[in-house]
Image (cartoon, rainbow, N blue to C red):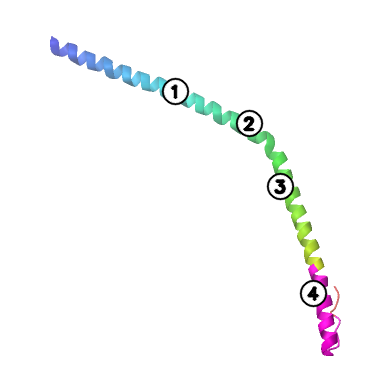
């Protein structure tokens, strides 16, 4: 009869261990799920605004790049014309599109 008491004590011990682990895991899972849900709602609210801001930033960057390229192109054309003039080469007009 002593052996059955020891076995039932171990059975109750392991049952309590698994029950406690299950409660902790369930609480952790619910907490994590709530945290992800709250974070997702915050992100979705600002995604559209962030996307529009990113588009505006990219368009502004491309506008600045086009302006710089146009200025550099004009400077290169002037430099080329001055070099051709000093070398005595007649400028051939490029066909305009």
**SS label for mark 3:** helix
Quadrant of residue 79 within the rendered picture: bottom right
Q: Which residue is mark 3?
A: 54
Quadrant of residue 39 within the rendered picture: top right
Residue 63: x %, y % from top left: 79, 57
Q: Residue at x 81, y 62 (%)?
A: 67
Circle 4/circle 3 CB separation < 8 Å: no
Q: Which residue is mark 4?
A: 76
The residue range painted magenta reads 72-93
Rendered position, 52 above or below 77: above
Q: Which residue is mark 1?
A: 26
Q: Mark 4 or 2 closer to N-term?
A: 2
Q: Mark 1 or 4 closer to N-term?
A: 1
Structural distance between the alpha carbons of marks 3 and 2: 20 Å
**SS label for mark 4:** helix
Q: Residue at x 74, y 50 (%)?
A: 57
Q: Quadrant of the N terminus?
A: top left
Q: Which residue is mark 2?
A: 41
């Amino acid at each position: 009869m002593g052996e059955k008491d020891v076995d039932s004590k171990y059975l109750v011990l392991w049952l309590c261990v698994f029950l406690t682990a299950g409660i902790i895991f369930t609480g952790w899972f619910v907490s994590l799920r709530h945290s992800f849900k709250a974070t997702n709602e915050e992100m979705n609210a600002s995604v559209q605004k962030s996307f529009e801001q990113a588009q505006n930033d990219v368009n502004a960057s491309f506008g600045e790049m086009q302006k710089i390229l146009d200025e550099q192109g004009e400077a290169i054309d002037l430099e080329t014309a001055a070099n051709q003039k000093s070398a005595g080469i007649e400028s051939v007009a490029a066909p305009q599109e």
